[in-house]
Image (cartoon, grey):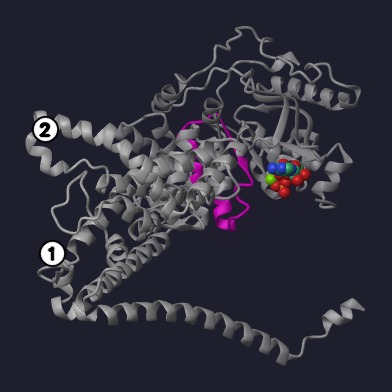
Amino acid sequence: MEVMTKIQSHPTKNNLFNKVRKAFSNENNPPNSHGNNNGPQKPMADNNGPGRIKTGMQSAGNREKNMEKAAKKEGKEVRMETKNLNIRYGTTVAVDNVSLPIYNHMVTALIGPSGCGKTTFLRALNRMHDLTRDAVISGEVLLDGKNIYDPRVNPVTIRRKIGMVFQKPTPFPTMSIYDNVVAGLKLVGIKNRKLLDEVCEKALKQAALFEEVKDRLKSPGGSLSGGQQQRLSIARALAIEPEVILMDEPTSSLDPKSTAKIEDLIVELRKNYSIIIVTHNLAQATRVSDYSIFMYLGQLIEYGKTHKLFNNPKDTRTENYISGKFG
Amino acid sequence: MQSDLLKRPLPVIYRWLGDKIFLTVVVLLGLTIIFLALSMAWVLYKEGSLAIHQFGVIGFLKGSVWDPGVQYVFGALPFIFGTMVTSIGALAIAFFPAIAIAIFMAEYAPSWLSKIIENLVHLIAAIPSVVVGIWGIFVFAPWMRETVYLPVVNFATEHYPSLLPVLGSPIGYGMTTATIILALMIIPFTTALTRDAIDKVPREQREAAWALGATRWEVIRMAVIPYARGGIMAGTMLSFGRAIGETMAVAMLIGNKNNFPFSIFGPAATMPSVIINEFREAVGNMHLSSLMAIGLALFAISLIVNLVAAYISRKLSITGGQAI
Ligand SMILES: Nc1ncnc2c1ncn2[C@@H]1O[C@H](COP(=O)(O)OP(=O)(O)OP(=O)(O)O)[C@@H](O)[C@H]1O
Ligand SMILES: [Mg+2]
């Protein structure tokens, strides 16, 4: 289990990226630097320590381990990791003991029938559950080997590193398109107009929206079409240079054309980011993702290379799901 | 059996009749309210027409002398001025505390505390105006006189005697006292309306801000307040309307001085206060008619304020992620 805490040196992108990142990096990062690699796995109270997996989970654990080995062989790095993640709402268990790695510069699709806990799982990855307080979380979520639920970690810093795009487009309706895109940068006190202009243009270009809005950056974000609003939401998430982007059914409210644009975008973004995308659209999962996770009733059933999982599923439940027998 | 029943359509005549009856009732009720308002305005106009014809609409509104005793001349300006100054002043005092309380209730306080505050706010809003007035007369006004007005006036007497006419006599009953009491009375109202507006902000908006790494306060500034601004402004306008019309407590505390010059601490009068104070004693037709005309002006101002509130709320409200 200890293989995966490899601390990343971030690939250098370009000057702009670094400038922006610098602005974030001085944020209250807790003194959590356990220089060695086995350090941060602090098991939570009500869990088995990592590595001591119950017999029932054995096969899943082995599979995961094998995958990691395979991945290492291919030179894949683990960016995030969950360990024995349990999430429940009251007595409803929504996520049941999920342990998995998320690879760097990969698109990972999260699939499964409605209500199986995909959204709940995803929101645990950037501590969005902190806000509602109805979810009880145990286990660990590691980002670059550090547990983001460590009490010394400031969730605000985590959310800047792990961006999120929601199912419904959520532009701030009273802000202009421009202000929407740079909203996250203004939060950290970046006021340099030139830098903001640059980031705005770059993010809009990445989100394949620039051409459509370049002449009306000052008009309100709410004045765009649904598909444009969703791309604006993506641009806004990209502008703060997160390291991981979580997307919860980002195209479910969009027409095929906008969907295609966003899918292209995801494939493109993979060069710079690690992406986890929840989708009900299996064709979409095969089109955009490198790895796929199949969840069922809160449990991780199968996780592997997308083409393997879809062409050659190991679990009958996965097979049933992808062949449309349920869900 | 049951499905059979459901399948059989209701005879058309019943459905038609039901719709018609409902429609008629609703329309009648609506018309009654409009009719009541119009007839009230008409009565005010009829009773006030004597004064309006005598002085002219503009002349009456601009007239700064109110003298039922000797000259028998009536002008509404002192009261319009008094109403505006006290209401705007009260709004200025009440606005930020009310917004702060509402934000605290909606965003920071745990729900039990938020409930307690909400009940307190409702309780304060329910205190009858005359009770607030009595408290003002016996407690607040004397306290203000001793701790604020007298020291300030004494200081001014020594150092800036030229300011004394502006400050006015520190008797305790006057414009400042009335304004502060008015502010206290509209805080619960503004708070409740602001809270409603904040509660309407969709969770997605907040989450979008959270996901950008906003702190609690930044979420409020970035997502909550801009989204709720229409509701907050409309609520503020409605509170302003309340302040304009507030009668009893103001009449009890403002000192009732019918003519300029008004001063900061000294007595003044508002449109409602002059009506309630002089109605019983008004013997002359012109005097009575002038009071009615003031009533008409008050009616018109309140109506305008409410219409503006409705307009703001429509203009600035946000539907479906779209700022209209
Ligand atoms: N706020 C909540 N309070 C209580 N139970 C919840 C809450 N949110 C989700 N649940 C429950 O947790 C389980 C997982 O929900 P979740 O939203 O994660 O499913 P999902 O896989 O995202 O489904 P879908 O594909 O329909 O979006 C469901 O049984 C759901 O009813
Ligand atoms: Mg979901």
When asked about the image quadrant of residue A164, the answer is: top right
Which percent across, then down, holds residue A74?
Answer: 68, 23
Task: Please rate how many residues cluster around mark 1, counting C-alpha atoms within 10 Å: few if below 14, some from 14 to 19, many from 20.
Answer: some
Determine the residue positioned at 80% across, 47% down.
A322
Read off the residue under disc 2.
Answer: B157
Q: Is residue A251 magenta?
A: yes
Determine the residue positioned at 37% across, 66% down.
B307
Read off the residue under disc 1.
Answer: B65
Looking at the rendered structure, the kind of residue marked 1 is: Val
Q: Which residues are magenta?
A: A233-261
Q: Is residue A232 above or below residue A9?
A: below
Q: Secondary structure at mark 2?
A: helix
To the question of a shared chain for discs 1 and 2, the answer is yes
Q: Is residue A22 visible?
A: yes
Q: Are marks 1 and 2 in contact (CB under 8 Å)?
A: no
Front residue of B60/B151: it is B151
Rounded to the nearest angstrom, the CA distance separating label 1 from label 2 is: 30 Å
